[in-house]
Image (cartoon, coloured by chain):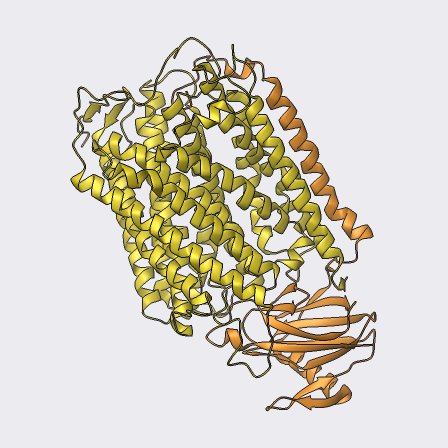
Chain colours: A yellow, B orange
Amino acid sequence: MTAIAQFRTCPDTGFKVHSAAEKLIKANAVAAVVFLLVGGVFGLSVALTRWQEVHLLPADWFYLALTAHGLDVLLVWIIFFEMAILYFASAILLNSRLATPWIGWLQFWLMLIGALITNVAVLQGDSSVMFTSYVPMKASPLFYLGIILFAVGALLGCCVFFGTLIVAKDEKTYEGSVPLVTFGAITAAIIAVFTIASGAIILIPTLLWSVGYISHIDPLMYKTVWWAMGHSSQQINVSAHVAVWYLIAAVIFGAKPLSEKVSRTAYLMYILFLQLASAHHMLVEPGLSSEWKIFNTSYAMYLAVMGSMIHGLTVPGSIEAAQRKKGFNKGMFEWLRKAPWGNPAFSGMFLSLVFFGFIGGITGVVMGTEQLNLIMHNTLYVPGHFHGTVVAGTTLAFMAVTYIVVPLIWRREIIWPGLAKLQPYLFGFGVAGISLFMMGAGTLGVSRRHWDIAFSDATLSFDYPAAAYLMLTLNGISAILAAIGGALYILIVVGSILFGKKRDEAAAPAPAEPTAAAATSYGSAGTAAVPGTFMLALIFFVTFVLYYFVNWKYLAETWGVS
Amino acid sequence: MAIHPPENKLWWNEPIEKTEIIWVGLCLIWALIMFFMMPYWHLFGEQNLTNEAYKVEPEAHVERAEAMADKYTVREEGDTGIPVVRPPAGSDVFVVARLWEWWPILELEKDKTYRLHLSSADWMHGWSLQPTNLNVQVHPGYDFVVTVTPNQTGEFAVVCNEFCGIGHHTMLGKIYVVE
């Protein structure tokens, strides 16, 4: 039963790599990338349909593609990748064996089978209910069953992760506290357990309702509990991609957190408050009190938002400190100018950080303000916002870390280094465009999940301003750009895994300079402060404040509502 | 590094760098400002949803809307003869959302206040007033009372912005605001 764990020592980093963990990381990452491809194709077809001059898909296919797009990328691609991250952050970073690899495989197969079942249900055409599947609109039972199996798999993955933490602690594979990246992964896993529990609470009855065992599901209750899964799962992503930012900063720059205490407290704020986010979707619903809305939508006085703003300073701050230590000390921004912008792991990570903050973060807080939601709810502003968080933020960060993972775990070099250099920029700016132009259209009132903004088949008529059409055209063009970036990513990753030059185990140079590894105890000790980062943070702050109050002004000009 | 355990095992005793303290302080102040903006707007702003909502059977809601239409219809519009209803200012106005129409069409007076009762007869819908861009969710089984005061005259559209099946993109309603 207990076979002796097989290890190899990574010549680049010195980590002990458990082969069972390595195999699971590979399997989950590959599954993730396959679903990114599928979901990405659906996404492109959606954007090309919204582009009124192209209007690619007929209405039924549009709604089908939109359902599949949400499922395959928001759920399947991201959660599969996060399973790989959990195994990496536990077994590899702690030099430990993975607890119960067979449960790990159960996780993998359950998630894969679940994802396939739901995809089949959607492709059969009778489950075009959107990712959110609001009752009383009914999908085929297979639709819910697949998601439930997928979630059970993910829950098992979290169990293996927590088990590995216990094994590592017991077997003393590390000293003191877990690394910050692992701490971030723990945050993600804790939120994941809450998320999956909420999903089970609502989807299991919904499955029973769809086969006729339960007569009625209250739509308001469904929506409240569903979003305790739907939005909280985005908080798994935030925790995971912030951990990835720290990881990339550590590997490329040898960066240390400015202060372990501050960074970890910021994560703690996620654990304590992020699960209140269901309220973000309930701000203009009947039957919920304003007090409930205000407390929950603000994550208890914006303490979780504060957590993100803190990471927004400490991640680039740790890079600045590391760069200044290496001598890039001139002026405010030499450390940033001379950063390795040609390394896709860095450029992807940094773009992810900037876009997540400026595009995804600010708009999320604005839209999540109780009254401001009135002028944004369910418009294209909503998908605009979350493409800023979950695509430009999470997906881009995951793409970036792949450029580190493939050489380390697969022992292969990245093929087409020239194109790889370009990839994060193509994808990043493409997605930033998607985000901004959808928000532009949303500000002009365009509805989300809407096949035809010209209302050609409607009895009555309404014309959106011409600018709305322009926004959707630009959105389509941005989507093409992002799709090229996404396709390149998939080609490069799959190509590297299959055909990349095998890396020489012995002679590989360390990518990170663990210089002065033991010289200082925290990142800013002995260096100047991080003025460049602080300046960037202040620019962010001013943008945030201005944009926030501009929206109150817009709100004040509309009809009185009481 | 962030991928290794902290070198100082007593990391929680390390001093915090000044930049970080300033930033955390700034964030906290901003967080509180944003938080208190919401109650502030409830007291002093003009755009706040009420907490007034009732459970209602879809059929009962449709009946109330029909009774209102019988009383206050001023004309009909469109090929299907949708009634245009002009309810008295300050009254209860029942609006039905159903696959795929907003029923009936309303004619309201500028700067007068109306108690809209929004509810759905079937699936979930989204009441999206355009081009004003005011958006409220409409559930079946819930009567949501939204008191509105139009501040402009003109012709407004009500778009459905919650996906409600294959005819979703044809679901339009109309509100006229007159002097």
The number of numbered badges drawn on the structure is 0
At 62% from the left and 88% from the top, the residue drawn is B78
Say if A19 sits above or below A81 in the image: above
- Where, by quadrant of the figure, is residue A540 drawn? top right
Say if B162 sits above or below B33 in the image: below
The quadrant of the rendering that contains the C terminus of chain A is bottom right
Q: Is residue A191 visible?
A: no
Please state if B178 lies on the left or on the right of A494 as rendered. Answer: right
Q: Is residue A198 visible?
A: yes
Percent across and percent down for residue A505 are 17, 23
At 17% from the left and 34% from the top, the residue drawn is A501
Q: Nearer the viewer, residue B1 or B178?
A: B178
At 20% from the left and 24% from the top, the residue drawn is A8
- Where, by quadrant of the figure, is residue A182 drawn? top left
Please state if B158 lies on the left or on the right of A94 as rendered. Answer: right
Say if A222 sits above or below A187 in the image: below
The quadrant of the rendering that contains the N terminus of chain A is top left
At 60% from the left and 28% from the top, the residue drawn is A535
Q: Nearer the viewer, residue A110 or A557?
A: A557
Percent across and percent down for residue A509 are 25, 20
Say if A405 sits above or below A57 in the image: above
Please state if A401 lies on the left or on the right of A378 as rendered. Answer: left
Percent across and percent down for residue A479 are 41, 56
Percent across and percent down for residue A289 are 70, 55
